[in-house]
Image: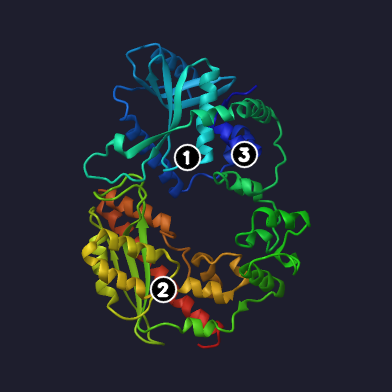
Amino acid sequence: MPRLSKSRFIAGWQCPLRLWYTVHEPWRATPPDPQLQAIFDQGHRLGQLAQQRYPSGVLVEADYRHTRQALEQTQVLMADPGVPAIFEAALEHDQVLTRVDALVRNGDGWDLVEVKGATRAKEVFQLDVAIQYWILTGAGIPVRDAGLLLIDRDYVYPGGAHDPQEFFRFEPLTRTCEHWLEWIEAQAVSFQEVAARTTPPQIEIGQQCFSPYPCPFYNHCSADREWPEHPIEELPYLAGERYQGLLERGVTTIDAIPDDYPLTVAQKRIRDAVAKGHPWTDPDLGEAVQGVEWPLFFLDFETAQPALPRYPGTSPFQALPFQFSCHIQRAPGVAPEHTDFLATADTDPRRPLAEALLNALGDRGSIVVYSSFERRVLGELADALPDLAEPLAALQERLWDLLRVLRNHYYHPAFKGSYSIKRVLPVLVQDLDYTALEVADGQAAAQAWIQMLDTDCDEERDRLAQALREYCFTDTLAMVRLREALLRAAGEL
């Protein structure tokens, strides 16, 4: 039987076809994009910090391409009582191999520690530990405890070097691992049989393509598939019994959903728009879009959520606003003005951003946003800056959500079930898009900001700052244009 790694085992758990491609045709995978690569890099940094919890621990130097040497080095280190912990320990049982993040000596046994850049023990993380527990116990290694080293969401960065004892928390999973053992034993054989096949298993595209991770082979598997224009998967929140019920009836497209099938109000609107082949427009759309107080301030924030807090007083994954863009329309029909803020110094950006924001937004007029995200950011700014809490709270009272108006009063079949501004904009405003931008989404913006702060190259710093400003500018201009498009749809422009 072919050897499996832990990662290949988990690939098989997600989808046997993913496992087969990983073993036989790995070149078919879509390479990780910059955002995914940034997540990998962050995980590497967290792993290095986690190792500091175990002073005098020793790293197995042999890499993943030198399995035999790694296995031998691990055995030598385990036999040395002077080694308190082993990092990247290589162990094998029944042709299944793992590299343990930290194997920590505990009396006459060992603790198995898996490091994750997350705050909770997802099912796939538990399986990750359980596979390793099965390998170690199967290899005759006494495991005293097994679990996850997770990020403590309550950690507040005091400044200076991060303390790994405070930053992480250990979640024991030994009992959970024991519940998985029988299943893992059986699946190991099954997955080895899949890996040994000379032809790929026949697996249909489905929800497993995106859970627990986006499959890197999805583009290959879906390349030749003929998709209906409006599959039932476009319906938001269609899952479980209702989704399966449609499949059991042979219904795969939205226009084929029976009128008497139980759907939510929003789902019925989508079905009716698709079936009729034209947008659904609520009679009250015009009144809703006009329900603003002038002048209008179209506002968008960009935030970063680093796992390792960058500034004192912040916590892991805390949303840190570093930029805003604001288009200001003083009266109907008047061309909008623009102002913005971008934190370019490597210091906590919240106070200078909040002060610039209060100066830009004045004390009257609707603040147009797209989703509840800006409300949440304003609330967190108020909590962090008590002396500015009152004026920031006043801004919250002026928020006017364009997304809510759109959801409640308009749907176009070309939205494909999504009200994301990236989906809506090209449908309603054809001459404005993000395709030519270097930074084209919020995740890329957060990554670009961190990169801008970290670089020593002035030219690169200026280029990234300009890219960030162009992206955020486009976001708020998009809201201006979307509101105009809705007025036209309502016959009021």
Q: Which of pointers 3 and 1 lies earlier in the amino acid sequence?
A: 3
- Asked if residue 113 is positioned above or below residue 450 in the image, the reply reads above
For the residues labelled 3 and 1, the Cα–Cα distance comes to 24 Å
Which residue was labeled with disc 3? 18
| Closest to the observer, 405 or 71 | 405
Instruction: Give the number of marks.
Output: 3
What amino acid does circle 2 point to? Answer: Leu
Q: Is residue 25 visible?
A: no
For the residues labelled 2 and 3, the Cα–Cα distance comes to 41 Å
**Percent position (x, y) of residue 446?**
37, 55
User: Nearer the observer, disc 2 or disc 1?
Assistant: 1
- Asked if residue 376 is positioned above or below residue 188 in the image, the reply reads below
**Percent position (x, y) of residue 150?**
40, 38
Question: In the image, is 270 to the left or to the right of 351?
Answer: right
- Tell me which corner region of the image, top left, top right, bottom left or bottom right, holds residue 282: bottom right
Label 3's element? helix
Question: In the image, is 381 to the left or to the right of 252?
Answer: left
Q: Residues within 10 Å of mark 1 (few under 14, many from 20)?
A: some
Question: In the image, is 202 to the left or to the right of 75?
Answer: right
Which residue was labeled with disc 1? 121
- Asked if residue 368 is positioned above or below residue 64 in the image, the reply reads below
**Percent position (x, y) of residue 436?**
45, 63
What amino acid does circle 3 point to? Answer: Arg
Find the residue positioned furthest to the front. Answer: 175
For the residues labelled 2 and 1, the Cα–Cα distance comes to 40 Å
Q: Residue at x 42, y 62 (%)?
A: 437
Label 2's element? helix
Q: Which of pointers 2 and 3 lies earlier in the amino acid sequence?
A: 3
- Disc on res. 265: none
- Disc on res. 477: 2
